[in-house]
Amino acid sequence: MSAAGDDAIMRLEGVGVSFPQRRGLGRQALLHAVNDVSFSLQRGEVVALVGESGSGKSTLGRAAIRVTRPTAGTIWFEGRDITALGRAELRPLRRRMQLIFQDPYGSLNPRIRIGEAIAEGIRLHGLARGDLRERVARALDGVGLRPEIAERLPAALSGGQRQRVAIARALAVEPSVVVADEPTSALDVSVQAEIIDLLKTLQGAHELAMLFISHDLRVVKDISDRVMVLYLGHVVEIGPTRRVFSAPAHPYTEALLRSVPRHPGAAAGTPIVLEGEPPNPMAPPSGCVFHPRCPHALPECRTADMRHRPVAPGHGTACIRTDLSLDAGGARR
Amino acid sequence: MSAALIRLRRNPALAIGSVLALCIAVVALFPGLFAPRSPVAIDMGRALQPPSAAFWFGTDHVGRDIFSRVVHGARVTLGIVGGSLALSALIGGLSGMVAGYLRGLTDLVSGQFIAVILSFPPIFLGVMITGILGSNVANLVLALAVVYLPLFFRAARSAAMVECARPYVEAAQVLGLGDGRVVFRHLLPNVVPAILTQYIILFPLALQIQAALGFLGLGVQPPTPDWGASLQESKDYVLFASWTAIFPGLALIVSSLAVILIGRGLQSRD
């Protein structure tokens, strides 16, 4: 899956996103939300972006499909450089790159009927082969909803149903890349698993490449082929999910994995409590951005760069320490 | 239907306002059914008669039946106010919505233009426009529309900005819809309530300004039975023939009240 073969549907090289922030009178500073991210996404592959709130995972996901514009680096999509395309040039590509929103209560227009919401994209991109109603019914069926729902307004639907509709709408235009931005975090726990299962099924059936943004590591382990761990806008570790979960190569990943609550009786692992708060992204620490909170930090970490070093095929870390033996604790199960 | 009735019973302001407005609307639409006489027929022989069984609201200084004038005036006065506010809502609402959606230079330029209009007091602006362009119905409608344009613009702009912050707008853009479709298909239905609210709030105010302009002789010209113009014509007789002023004035008050009650009723709903 992570072979270097050029089945890559999307490739990011040195992508950075920064936002100008006004500080006081006239002074401007840049908030670097995402720094120097490079990776590629293969056809049918699920890459998870994990990290705390504010780590830049949503910003990165949105920049990748050009919902926002990156301020550095290059994005290749289906062999084409889409980094600097304008809105009009992007419009035909929108069909191939879709976004599933976090909040199904806000992402559906309260005054547009479900059927129309789904039909809109199909019609816009000229995909209505045959009967549009039938297309909509099929899209609804694909996410396990009955066709009658097409006549309803979003207010008449539950959160889980709405998220199914949002998924149906995104997939109805037959995208090849989907960014799922925390698609379950606004839902009841009982519904989350259903939505994840649905996404997994659809992802497999349509051979979708997916960027799955989440802070729920259990879900990530379940759905993704590879994981990218973000901290303060930097990718600190990237690798195959199974490997990262069993043999993390970055102290931050280790801390994240150890913080996952475990079932009673699972292998014991002491949670690592990180000291302090994530630093202010406007004034990131020097060197390795994680060093002020890292339990394994050395003096060199204050000046180390964040360049990745390989620890295994397809597995890289930004940590300079090669002498650590990190333990994922019970999350390994 | 019964659900609507129950809702009205729980909300007396809305119920009373709606019934009043309905009655006024019927009168305004079919004045011929209610007015016993012509609103413009002069008969000096029966000038300034007090209210009686024959002339319910009395007669004015040239013997016209005030009841008939008030009934026919409903269409004139309310039509001008309603029409000019609708024009104002259409232009101000649409431009405000677009400015709130696009932001940037469009927003800045139109916002400054709106601020210029807003810097004039409404009555002064009304006097200026009708005074310069001439007193006729078309210019009066234009004046009222311009006076209230900024308020519709601002209401629509802020509503559009609130809606744009909600993910469905971004979702529509991500789907690949162009700005036009996003604005008119997605934004518009969610901005219309704010524009309607503004319409209801402004209706009594516009009615007052319209009457004031009529009173200043800058609105509808005699002998058209406009309520404000009727007040103006009554001003020389009001001390000894108060009915000439009271009934057109009451018509203005009751109409304003009806709209205010509806507004209050809608506000307190849920």
Image (spheres, rainbow, N blue to C red):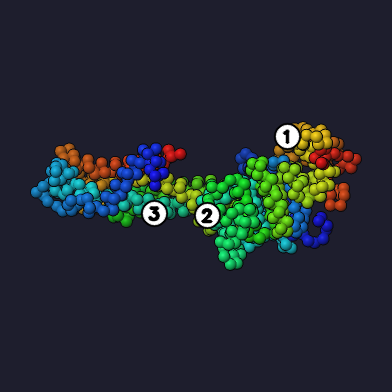
Query: Which amino acid type is marked by label 1?
Result: Glu
Query: Which amino acid type is marked by label 2?
Result: Glu
Chain letter, disc 1 residue? A
Query: Which amino acid type is marked by label 3?
Result: Leu
Residue A253, numbered label:
none
| Disc 3: CA contacts within 10 A as few (<14), some (14-19) or many (>=20) | some
| Disc 1: CA contacts within 10 A as few (<14), some (14-19) or many (>=20) | few
Percent x, y of residue A6: 80, 61
At mark 2, the secondary structure is helix
Residue B87, numbered label:
3
**A62, A138: nearer the viewer:** A138
Residue placed under numbered mark 1 in the picture: A277
Residue at the farthest right position: A323
**B168, B47: nearer the viewer:** B168
> Disc 2 vs disc 3: Cβ atoms closer than 8 Å?
no
Chain letter, disc 2 residue? A
At mark 3, the secondary structure is helix
User: Could you give the CA–CA distance between mark 2 and mark 1, rounded to whole angstroms?
Assistant: 48 Å
Residue occupying image coordinates x 75% and y 59%: A43
| Disc 2: CA contacts within 10 A as few (<14), some (14-19) or many (>=20) | few
Percent x, y of residue A243: 83, 47
Chain letter, disc 3 residue? B
Residue occupying image coordinates x 32% and y 52%: B80
Residue placed under numbered mark 2 in the picture: A151
Task: Name the quadrant of the C terminus of chain A.
Answer: top right
Percent x, y of residue B91: 43, 54
Q: Is residue B124 visible to the viewer in this orientation of the structure?
A: no
Residue occupying image coordinates x 43% and y 38%: B268
